Image: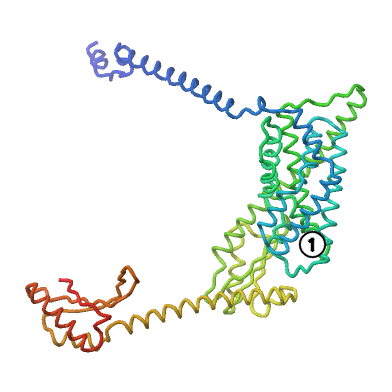
């Protein structure tokens, strides 16, 4: 019994049981639980209030005006008379801007273009199940596109066009940014048209979505026989049009515009089938295009990292690069001017492609005589590259010459080294001296004079009068050497 009591007394106590029995601990636990419940309650209140605030601020349904919006878009769909002539003239203006590489002229042409009407009419027709409006919108869109291409082709056939400008080339290859601009531009256009209070947003949407330049570029491609430009520009125009129309449809459905009802159930079912097929035709290519452009954007980013990080070699300059994305086999060519890059270096660059997940990239480096072959015998473009490189070198030479002239000027205005040595020989107390240019300003002009700094030995205590005497004597001595107008003597002790 004694041993059992000893074992019981030696058994460690459970602190949790003691805390559970402690009324102060229980009260503290209850207070913590109450505080947590209050925090959750106030957080829910905050979320509800914030959500209600956002819903009120971002609400667009209450301010929408469906009847006037539908009426306005239906009126802008039709292309005849004034609208058609305005389109033709704006196309010619835009072609002039692309021909002269003038961005302001291109923007001005987009401001006056009525091309947004039938595109938004197509999206509206799908959103409200209006087959007649859909047919009319597509028919007028086809007329507008056809007249625009004819006008731009005629302009480029008559007028001298020279080499491709940057404004033209920018409209031959769609990018992910073009899709995003079309999506948000279409949403902005239909929202602006839905307001009871009309504003000047629509012209801004026309500029942002840039529907006109691709049609002008398509005309340029026909006039010059460059079918790749034609198909690339038409592809860009279709992408913009599809996403503008698709966004218009989504916004119209969100705003709950009145859907057109037909008295004949059979016609209504037929209408819904037509609208459904049209939506499918719109959405399926949009998903495919968007996916390819996103993949292309990521791939191009890796290519850019490869170029920036790896393609460097002494005494050479990367003057041109061309990248074409293809999901199966992409192509990258770079042109170097300067010293010949060894084959081993180029092979080492190719060996680093897997590091950037560019295993299937068809990579080519052109330099020297290879450049002309790579450029397909386009001597004009090659000459432009050489001229740009020469102008850059000439500019650098001018900068170097200007700096050399500045150095010579400072040396002429300064003190010859022989005179500095004479000063040190004549004055034992002077430890060292130096001179430097110092800019002085006056009410009439700025000037640069040379300043002589005298430093005396640390172990010699020289009164200020002696220092002043030294500086005056050295100044007079320099004056006899013809340097009094350009030299000023000062002490740094």
Residue furthest front in the image = 444
Q: In the image, is 441 to the left or to the right of 387?
A: left
What element does badge 1 sit on? helix
On the image, the x and y values in percent for residue 172 come to 74, 58
Query: Toward the viewer: 483 or 54?
Result: 483
Q: In the image, is 413 to the left or to the right of 38?
A: left
On the image, the x and y values in percent for residue 358 come to 64, 59
Relative to 456, say whether 181 is above or below: above
On the rendered image, what quadrant is the N terminus found in? Answer: top left
On the image, the x and y values in percent for residue 138 come to 85, 42
Residue 198 in sight from this viewpoint = yes
Relative to 426, say whether 42 is above or below: above
On the rendered image, what quadrant is the C terminus found in? Answer: bottom left
Total residue callouts = 1
Q: Residues within 10 Å of mark 1 (few under 14, many from 20)?
A: many
Q: Is the image coloured rainbow, by chain, by secondary structure, or in one colour?
A: rainbow
Q: In the image, is 408 to the left or to the right of 309?
A: left
Based on the displayed image, in which of its 4 quarters is residue 170 positioned? bottom right
Query: Toward the viewer: 190 or 242?
Result: 190
Name the residue rendered at 26%, 78% in the picture: 435
Query: Toward the viewer: 11 or 320?
Result: 320
Residue 341 in sight from this viewpoint = no
Name the residue rendered at 24%, 13% in the picture: 5
Q: In the image, is 422 to the left or to the right of 360?
A: left
Location of mark 1 (residue): 220
Name the residue rendered at 39%, 18% in the picture: 35
On the image, the x and y values in percent for residue 41 come to 47, 18
Based on the displayed image, in which of its 4 quarters is residue 282 positioned? top right
Name the residue rendered at 55%, 65% in the picture: 310
């Amino acid at each position: 019994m004694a041993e059992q009591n000893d074992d019981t007394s030696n058994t460690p106590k459970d602190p949790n049981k003691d805390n559970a029995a402690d009324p102060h601990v229980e009260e503290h636990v209850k207070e913590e639980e109450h505080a947590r419940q209050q925090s959750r309650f106030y957080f829910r209140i905050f979320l509800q209030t914030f959500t209600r605030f956002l819903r009120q601020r971002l609400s667009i349904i209450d301010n929408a005006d469906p009847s006037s919006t539908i009426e306005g878009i239906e009126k802008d769909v039709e292309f005849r008379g004034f609208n058609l002539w305005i389109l033709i003239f704006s196309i010619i203006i835009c072609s002039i801007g692309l021909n002269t590489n003038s961005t302001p002229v291109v923007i001005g042409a987009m401001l006056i273009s009525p091309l947004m009407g039938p595109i938004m009419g197509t999206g509206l027709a799908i959103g409200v199940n209006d087959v007649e409006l859909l047919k009319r919108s597509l028919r007028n869109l086809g007329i507008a596109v056809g007249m625009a291409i004819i006008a731009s082709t005629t302009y480029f056939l008559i007028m001298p066009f020279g080499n491709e400008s940057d404004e033209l080339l920018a409209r031959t290859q769609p990018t992910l940014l073009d899709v995003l601009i079309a999506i948000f531009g279409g949403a902005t256009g239909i929202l602006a048209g839905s307001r009871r209070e009309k504003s000047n947003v629509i012209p801004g949407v026309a500029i942002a979505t840039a529907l006109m330049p691709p049609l002008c570029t398509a005309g340029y491609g026909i006039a010059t026989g460059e079918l790749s430009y034609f198909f690339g520009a038409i592809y860009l125009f279709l992408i913009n049009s599809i996403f503008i129309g698709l966004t218009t449809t989504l916004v119209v459905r969100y705003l709950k515009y009145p859907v057109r009802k037909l008295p004949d159930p059979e016609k209504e079912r037929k209408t819904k089938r037509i609208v459904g097929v049209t939506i499918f035709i719109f959405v399926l290519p949009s998903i495919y295009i968007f996916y390819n452009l996103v993949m292309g954007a990521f791939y191009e980013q890796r290519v850019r990292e490869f170029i920036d990080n790896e393609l460097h070699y002494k005494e050479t300059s990367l003057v041109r690069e061309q990248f074409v994305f293809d999901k199966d086999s992409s192509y990258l060519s770079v042109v170097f001017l300067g010293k010949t890059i060894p084959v081993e270096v180029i092979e080492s660059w190719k060996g680093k492609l897997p590091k950037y997940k560019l295993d299937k990239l068809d990579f080519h480096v052109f330099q020297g005589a290879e450049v002309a072959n790579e450029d397909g015998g386009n001597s004009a473009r090659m000459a432009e590259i050489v001229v740009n490189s020469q102008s850059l070198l000439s500019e650098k030479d001018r900068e170097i010459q200007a700096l050399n002239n500045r150095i010579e000027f400072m040396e002429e205005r300064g003190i010859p080294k022989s005179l500095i040595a004479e000063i040190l020989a004549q004055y034992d107390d002077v430890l060292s001296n130096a001179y430097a240019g110092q800019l002085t300003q006056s009410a009439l002009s700025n000037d640069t004079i040379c300043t002589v700094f005298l430093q005396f030995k640390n172990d010699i205590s020289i009164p200020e009068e002696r220092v002043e005497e030294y500086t005056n004597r050295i100044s007079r001595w320099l004056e006899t050497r013809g340097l009094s107008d350009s030299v000023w003597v000062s002490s740094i002790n």
